[in-house]
């Protein structure tokens, strides 16, 4: 009942693990896959190893979390070993793998994409980290021309579907959505973290995060993510993967009504546990059954008004 098709790939359900959460190792991805995710996404991977920002890198705030990890990862070549260890198992239980990648320019993106391609089902281009600096992340995703170049470069380099993850921290997300689609994006993931924001320790006056500023995730950003999906759906034809504060089946229905074909869950894993994927799928299925609906009946429904 929850099976979906997206970018020519079939997924057993539309509830995926988002990038950056439980994606540091193969064992963590396997655990999320075992807990019912339709697809799992790696931590964002780059060409070279990065140790990331200094601690603390995550702090809980009202309605969610702020994080500034600083793109820590062992480098794409090293990370491939993690995927080799779980590939057969994931295939057996029909869970797809999304490889999240970052780079500082179109060439670097394409290089990482080519290295990772044989080990994943889809790629997700992270052009939207709000605090990466150095030309990475949102510095690309806030610039329509540069975003277009990154996407078209990767599309020329690989055959598997390419999703592009957008930042909400722009004045018009529709403009970026159109640019990446014209660059050849097969799907759009919306949204990355909001902000950045900050928290200060009032005993010392010191900003809590090692990086001072971090991107906001969790329940509080859901209305913004929903509006972004709704706006993107109104201007492009490619499938949209909604992400931002999703913790229940009710949330998924809202995102689908805004125009999302699938969703990703990140911070929600902290709120409801590893089995959040099973829980959300059950709630979504109950909603559809009780209302005698199929997913296709609710996709984009909010645009009728
Ligand atoms: C990080 C945070 C993000 O929001 C993102 O998209 C990528 C990386 C990080 O701090 O590692």
Image: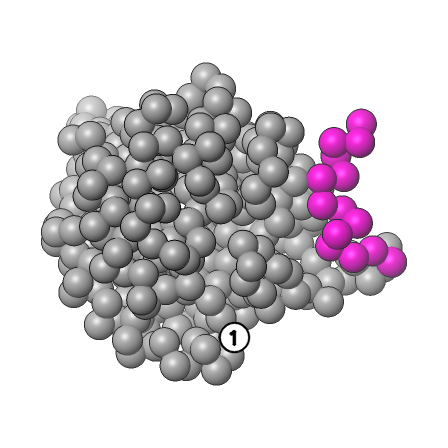
Q: Can the viewer see residue 45 in this picture?
A: no
Q: Residue at x 87, y 58 (%)?
A: 292
Residue 301 highlighted magenta (yes or no): yes
Going 49% across and 46% down the picture, which residue do you hit? 186
Farthest front residue in view: 156
Q: How many marks?
A: 1
Determine which quarter of the picture holds residue 302. Answer: top right
Q: Is residue 16 visible?
A: yes
Label 1: how many Cα within 10 Å (few below 14, some 14–19, many 20+): some
Q: Nearer the viewer, residue 232 or 267?
A: 232
- In depth, the one of 272 and 102 nearer the eye is 102
Instruction: State the extent of the magenta-drawn residues as a range.
Output: 292-305
User: Please, which colouring scheme is shown?
Assistant: one colour
| Residue nearer the viewer, 10 or 53 | 10
Residue at the location (32% across, 67% down)?
A: 119
- Residue at 45 percent across and 42 percent down: it is 185
Residue 285 occupies which quadrant of the picture?
bottom right
Taking 112 as reference, is 231 above or below it?
A: above
Q: In the displayed structure, does residue 32 sit left or right of residue 287?
A: left
Where is residue 22 drawn, in percent x and y? 36, 61
Q: Which residue is mark 1?
A: 94
| Secondary structure of the residue carrying numbered label 1 | loop
Q: Position of residue 240 (x, y in %)?
A: 56, 43
Q: Residue furthest top?
A: 171
Within 8 Å of ligand 1, the CB of disc 1?
Answer: no
> Split into 4 quadrants, where in the image is the N terminus?
bottom right
Based on the picture, tell me whether residue 136 belongs to the magenta stretch: no
| Quarter in which the C terminus is drawn | top right
């Amino acid at each position: 009942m929850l099976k979906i098709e997206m970018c020519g790939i079939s997924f057993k359900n539309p509830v995926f693990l988002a990038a950056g959460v439980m994606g540091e190792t193969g064992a963590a991805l396997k655990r999320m896959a075992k807990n019912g995710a339709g697809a799992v996404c790696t931590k964002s991977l780059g060409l070279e190893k990065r140790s990331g920002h200094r601690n603390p890198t995550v702090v809980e705030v009202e309605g969610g979390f702020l994080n500034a990890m600083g793109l820590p990862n062992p480098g794409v070549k090293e990370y491939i070993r993690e995927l080799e260890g779980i590939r057969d198992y994931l295939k057996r239980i029909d869970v797809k793998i999304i490889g999240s990648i970052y780079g500082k320019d179109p060439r670097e993106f394409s290089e990482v994409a080519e290295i990772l391609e044989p080990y994943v089902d889809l790629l997700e281009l992270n052009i939207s980290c709000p605090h990466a600096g150095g030309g990475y992340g949102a510095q690309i995703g806030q610039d329509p021309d540069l975003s277009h170049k990154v996407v078209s470069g990767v599309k020329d380099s690989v055959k598997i579907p390419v999703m592009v993850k957008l930042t909400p921290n722009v004045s018009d997300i529709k403009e970026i959505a159109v640019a990446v689609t014209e660059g050849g994006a097969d799907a759009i993931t919306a949204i990355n973290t909001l902000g950045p924001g900050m928290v200060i320790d009032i005993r010392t006056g010191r900003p809590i995060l090692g990086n001072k500023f971090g991107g906001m995730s969790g329940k509080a950003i859901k209305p913004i993510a929903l509006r972004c999906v709704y706006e993107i759906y109104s201007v492009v034809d490619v499938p949209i993967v909604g992400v931002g504060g999703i913790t229940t089946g009710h949330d998924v229905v809202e995102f689908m009504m805004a125009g999302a074909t699938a969703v990703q869950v990140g911070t929600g894993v902290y709120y409801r546990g590893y089995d959040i994927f099973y829980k959300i799928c059950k709630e979504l299925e109950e909603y559809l059954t009780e209302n005698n609906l199929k997913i296709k009946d609710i996709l984009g429904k909010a645009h009728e008004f």
